[in-house]
Amino acid sequence: MSRIGKKPVPLPSGVKVDIQGRRVTVSGAKGSLSFDHPMGVSVTAEGDKINVSRESDVAELRAFHGLTRALLNNMVIGVTQGYQQKMEIYGTGYNCSASGQTLEMNVGFSHPVKLPIPEGIKVDIEVAAARGDETPAKLTINGIDKQVVGQFARTIKDARPPEPYKGKGVRYEGEQIRRKAGKAFAGTAG
């Protein structure tokens, strides 16, 4: 048995699970999420827990067994607590702003980078503009779907990945950037 897959997913109070065929819908205080589990894997809700099982020991089903349980657990956490990812933007003159469903960043290009904010995602800007290379601009991405929060954070980072010489660019909070030494100037050759 899968060590992850055989653990039941605990359901906190206030979380409802609806299973219609292969579609599993989890509803809680923060919203509702749905998931179609793979063929060969079955999901049952009993009291205050969700159990996941598989039909056979085929390698593919063993992998789907643990994956299904992990995705259901992420859904339960998402509808009760939610997920967040904090980002930092380093670089003199770099800044960001959110208006409507668009995140606009000035990150050293001749034009601002405009990214559409996915549905169900909220972007909070704590510090709008970076001040020098020491004080970054800061933003937080909040949502109930772990996959969407993580993918949007990666899309923001891909707009201007941190460079290794000065560390300018977008990074996750607390991420360490491997720095390289710049060119060493030789003395005057005479």
Image: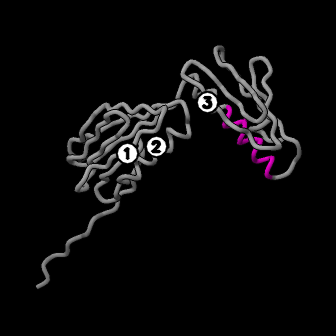
- SS label for mark 3: strand
Q: Quadrant of residue 78?
A: top right
Please name the residue shown 56% across and 18% down the image. Answer: 29
How many tags in the picture? 3
**Residue for badge 1:** 115
- SS label for mark 2: helix
Query: Badge 2 local density, few (<14 within 10 Å), some, or many (20+)?
Result: some
Q: Give coordinates of residue 51: x percent, y percent.
A: 79, 29
Please name the residue shown 21% across and 48% down the image. Answer: 92
125 vs 187, left or right, is right
CB contact under 8 Å: marks 1 and 2 = yes
CB contact under 8 Å: marks 3 and 1 = no
Q: Give coordinates of residue 139: x percent, y percent.
A: 35, 36
Above or below, 190 against 131 in this view is below
Please name the residue shown 32% across and 51% down the image. Answer: 169
Residue nearer the viewer, 117 or 44: 117
Residue nearer the viewer, 101 or 60: 101
Instruction: Tell me how the rendering is colored.
Output: one colour
Q: Which mark is residue 152?
A: 2
17 vs 115, left or right, is right
- SS label for mark 1: strand
The mark nearer the N terminus, 3 or 1, is 3
Magenta span of residues: 60-72
